[in-house]
Amino acid sequence: MIYEVAKSGSSDPKAVALSSLKEQGWMEKDLEHYLFEHLRNLVSTDLFVIGQSSPYQPEVDLLALDAAGDLWLFELKRERSSSDNLLQVLRYSQSYSELSIDGLSGIFERFTGVKTRSLAVAFCEYFGYGEPSAPQEWGGRIGRSHHLVVVTDGADDETIAAVNHWQRHGVDIQIWPFRIYAWSANSFGLELPELYIKGRRISTSLPGIFVVNTNRTYNAASEPYMLQHGVALATAQKWMQKINQITAASRVMLYGNGIGILAIGVATPHRQDSNLNGEPMRYVKLRDFKRLAAPLPPSKIKKVAGKDYVFRHTVLELGGVEGERVWTEALKHS
């Protein structure tokens, strides 16, 4: 429940009016499509959607993989859930557990319409596993563990008891209840609680927009390594921890001192400690990596953002509208 609370503290809390998808003119499929488009923002930046149900087909509503290769099954119910819904998602889990990587690749191919790109290769590209042997190694691990989530507008006592039963028997299954609120003529409120599986928090902070200094002034090997391998890195123990600020799905711009933004990419969950010419380093792998055709100079960055940034920081987060402006301008140069 969401309450309106007066800042004066003088009045009682007022519950914001509850609504429903039907009252807001949406069907279950509308919410399914919305969750598909925004799942990584609503749930986790650590998810790669590989399948969505088709009309009249015995398929789970949304199918996704995380960076560990675990399979996530999201079953959406517009009305109050029942224990029958749990049996349905358990049956889906059983059927998917019988599939090899080829079977999961078939689901991925039908979903994307691309028959020339295997799931293992797409998985490794998405999560930043760039070693040549990675697709083969991950091919035997993808989809072996399952997490089941029933997305529902409330749940009855029978469903809660059923979930508790399966959890006691080691099944990763959760109810994820949503609430709909009347908001305005053009929007409605969607409330989703934090999502936990076996005590592990799945919900993560929202991705940001970051500038990472290539450190060309102090370490001549740093910038070439970033550009060649498509990573954002920091060297020396005191700076390495700065890389941890960059959450998965964050947009990253590599900045060379005195030159400007040289390349852009999207952070994957894959981060690793290594060494660069004998010096310890930590890097995060970037997907959709692009080198700019021409650097975006500091003067242009400041003009576009309307803000006088100091780019000496190892990792600098650009907030709000300013960050979006700089990212959009960098895209024009790629």
Image (cartoon, helix red, strand yellow):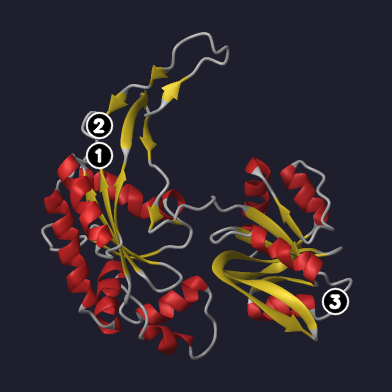
Q: Which of the two labelled residues, at mark 3 and mark 1, occupies the earlier sequence position?
A: 1
Label 3 Cα crowd, 10 Å radius (few <14 / some 14-19 / many 20+): few
Task: Verify CB contact (< 8 Å) between mark 3 and mark 1.
Answer: no
Q: Which mark is residue 20?
A: 2
Question: Does residue 314 sit above or below 139 in this rendering?
Answer: above
Earlier residue among tags 1 and 2: 2
Q: Which mark is residue 219?
A: 3
Q: CA distance from mark 3 to mark 1?
A: 55 Å
Q: Write the residue at 25% across / 71% down.
A: 110
How would you rate the neighbour count of disc 2 (Cα within 10 Å): few for under 14, some for 14-19, many for 20 or more? some
Secondary structure type for disc 2 = loop
> Residue 322's x, y, as percent?
68, 44
Residue 230 in percent (x, y) is at 63, 75
* Quadrant of the drawing holding the C terminus: bottom right
Say whether marks 1 and 2 touch (CB < 8 Å).
yes
Residue at screen point 25% across, 31% down: 20
- Which amino acid does the dot numbered 3 rest on? Asn
Q: Residue at x 48, y 76 (%)?
A: 125
Residue 70, picture quadrant? bottom left
Amino acid type shown at disc 2? Ser
What amino acid does circle 1 point to? Asp
Question: Residue 246 location in percent, x, y?
Answer: 63, 60
| Nearest to the observer: residue 6 or residue 306 | 6
Residue 54 visible in image: no
| Label 1 Cα crowd, 10 Å radius (few <14 / some 14-19 / many 20+) | some
Which numbered tag is attached to residue 153?
Answer: 1
User: Residue 288 at x, y = what percent?
Assistant: 55, 69
- Residue farthest toward the right in the current orientation of the protein: 217
Q: Is residue 74 visible?
A: yes
